[in-house]
Image (cartoon, rainbow, N blue to C red):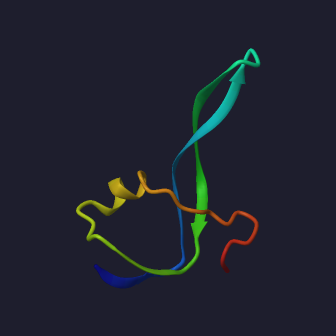
Amino acid sequence: MEEHRHEPTVHHHVHLHVTHYLRDGQTWDHLLSEHGHEHNHSVVQHSHEPHQDVDKEHLQEAHVHDHGHPYD
């Protein structure tokens, strides 16, 4: 794995959400939803397996979006 840095950026894509929902007070279910909007990624330095298709794989990664403190 090679360590590398991603510069801050703003972009748009669809977010998928899973919410735990207690149906009828008895059974836990997963409620799925999606929405899209512009959001930020602050600078990050990390290492991981090489990407084969960055844009496609990014949609499948879990990551934090700092909506309260976007970068300048």
Q: Nearer the viewer, residue 23 or 18?
A: 23
Q: Nearer the viewer, residue 67 or 25?
A: 25
Q: Quadrant of the C terminus?
A: bottom right
Q: Is residue 62 left or right of residue 1?
A: right
Numbered label tally = 0
Residue 49 lies in quadrant: bottom left
Q: Does 71 appear above or below 51?
A: below
Q: Residue furthest left?
A: 52
Q: Position of residue 58 (x, y in %)?
A: 40, 58
The residue that appears at 76% across and 66% down in the rendered structure is 68
Q: Nearer the viewer, residue 14 or 51?
A: 51
Q: Nearer the viewer, residue 58 or 10?
A: 58
Q: Residue furthest top?
A: 24
Q: Position of residue 8 (x, y in %)?
A: 54, 78
Q: Position of residue 71 (x, y in %)?
A: 66, 77
Q: Residue furthest front?
A: 26
Q: Position of residue 59 (x, y in %)?
A: 42, 52
The residue that appears at 60% across and 61% down in the rendered structure is 39
The residue that appears at 43% across and 80% down in the rendered structure is 46
Q: Is residue 14 left or right of residue 25?
A: left
Q: Quadrant of the N terminus?
A: bottom left
The residue that appears at 35% across and 56% down in the rendered structure is 57
